[in-house]
Image (cartoon, rainbow, N blue to C red):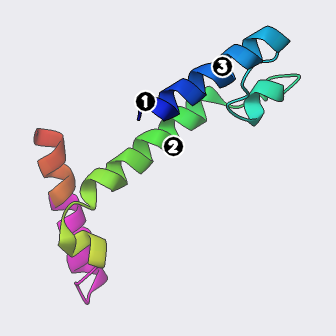
Amino acid sequence: MADATAAWRSAAIALATTGTSRGDGLHTRRKYQRSYDRIAYKQRWGIEAFFARIKQWCRIATRCDKLADSFLGFVKLASIMLWLK
């Protein structure tokens, strides 16, 4: 463990002395920020988070119900239970 820390520190010092910096991703090399619709992104995230929470019930995640009506009924029940929490 100590060897890895020493190696990392020496690499960081070498980078600092040459004037270069670590690039953690491609976004650091972009010349301009991409535009996106913040409202649509926020709504999409809310829906994805809802489905992630609702899939905690195995009955919904595996879709064990044969009929669409019974599946939809259980989805509604699980939604109400999450809303009341």
- Count residues near mark 2 (Cα–Cα under 10 Å), then give few for <14, some for 14-19, many for 20+: few
The answer to which of marks 2 and 3 sits earlier in the sequence is 3
Q: Tell me, for residue 44, which label it has, or none.
A: 2
Q: Nearer the viewer, residue 10 or 33?
A: 10
Residue position for label 1? 2
- Above or below 69: residue 44: above
Q: Quadrant location of residue 74?
A: bottom left
Looking at numbered disc 3 in the image, what kind of residue is underneath it?
Answer: Ala
- Residue 19 appearing in the image: no
Give me the residue at 84% from left, 27% from top.
30
Give me the residue at 29% from left, 71% from top.
61
Main structural element of the magenta stretch: helix, strand or loop?
helix
x, y (%) of residue 40?
A: 59, 36
Q: How many numbered marks does the figure carry?
A: 3
Of helix, strand and loop, which one carries label 2?
helix
What are the residue bounds of the magenta stretch? Answer: 63-77
> On the picture, is 12 further left or further right than 29?
left
- Above or below 31: residue 48: below
Q: Tell me, for residue 12, which label it has, or none.
A: 3
Of helix, strand and loop, which one carries label 1?
helix
Kindly check if marks 2 and 3 are in contact, taking CB atoms under 8 A apart as contact.
no
- The alpha-carbon separation of the residues under discs 2 and 3 comes to 39 Å
Q: Tell me, for residue 34, which label it has, or none.
A: none
In front: label 2 or label 3: 3
> On the picture, is 31 further left or further right than 39?
right
- Residue 83 appearing in the image: yes
Looking at numbered disc 2 in the image, what kind of residue is underneath it?
Answer: Arg
- Count residues near mark 1 (Cα–Cα under 10 Å), then give few for <14, some for 14-19, many for 20+: few
In front: label 1 or label 3: 1
Give me the residue at 22% from left, 84% from top.
65
Of helix, strand and loop, which one carries label 3?
helix
